[in-house]
Amino acid sequence: MPSKRSYVSPLRAQAAAQTRELILRQATELFAERGYGRVTVADIAAAAGVASKTVFASVGSKSDILNRIVDEGVNASGYERAMQTLLEERTPESVLRALAHGTRMGNERQFTVHEAIRKALPVHEDGEALWERATADYRDALHTTARHMHTLTPAPSYPVEETADLLWHWFGPTGWRTLVVESGWSWDRAEDVLYRTAVAALR
């Protein structure tokens, strides 16, 4: 006797996906505003207009939610496309200009996600591993940029590894946050100064 196929309603699946997206968006905003440790699943449910059991069924625990925020933030960063454009550049200045603009756009678009993660680190059960997972592709992209720059003329005045470290110092999320959030700079001003600083230092 043939077994019955389970039927999955496309509309139901779409509604479930929209609910997950809403929960994650509201959780990201709450984590960024209040800090991970001060937000409960009930808070997230209230912000999303659903029951707490819906949050658990749709996304999981608060820790699961943060993990999803990290993964989706990495996927939404667009770093692969930005790197393709950057690696086509053939002068150190044009590479750094593309890097300054690309990292600026990524940090500006993902600002709330970065804040949610940053504020979770002191209280998360495995904050160090969380940060490493959130930034691994970012750091790898800057290492790739450093290696590319050393194929150009003139090459940076530092070894490849030190060049990568300096790029992380200037163009990593902490560098952008220091200027834009802590010092009140505009994104445009920060992009221009970081670009000029990198050009002058690596020349």
Image (spheres, rainbow, N blue to C red):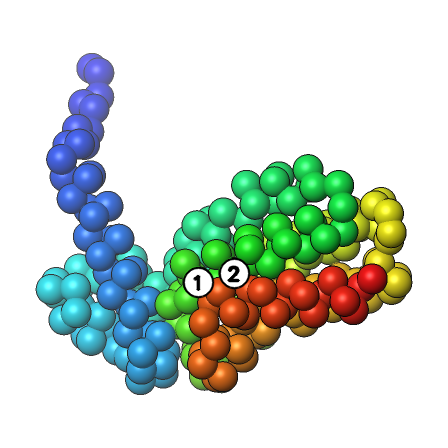
Relative placement, left or right, of 34 versus 138 is left
Asked which quadrant contains residue 34, the reply is: bottom left
Label 2: element kind: helix
Residue hosting label 1? 108
Residue 67 seen anywhere in this rendered image of the structure:
no
Badge 1 crowding class, 10 Å Cα cut-off, few under 14, some 14 to 19, many 20 or more, is some
Image height check: is 77 above or below 50? above
* Amino acid on which disc 1 is placed: Glu
Q: Percent x, y for residue 74?
A: 49, 54
Q: Are marks 1 and 2 in contact (CB under 8 Å)?
A: yes
Q: Using the numbered discs, state the Cα–Cα distance from disc 1 to disc 2 in whole angstroms.
A: 6 Å
Asked which quadrant contains residue 86, the reply is: top right
Q: Percent x, y for residue 83?
A: 62, 45
Badge 2 crowding class, 10 Å Cα cut-off, few under 14, some 14 to 19, many 20 or more, is many
Image quarter (top left, top right, bottom left or bottom right) of the C terminus: bottom right
Residue occupying image coordinates x 20% and y 24%: 5
Residue occupying image coordinates x 47% and y 67%: 187
Label 1: element kind: helix
Tag of residue 104: 2
Asked which quadrant contains residue 100, the reply is: bottom right
Image height check: is 133 above or below 175? above
Residue occupying image coordinates x 35% and y 75%: 32
Image height check: is 103 above or below 184? above
* Amino acid on which disc 2 is placed: Arg
Relative placement, left or right, of 38 versus 74 is left
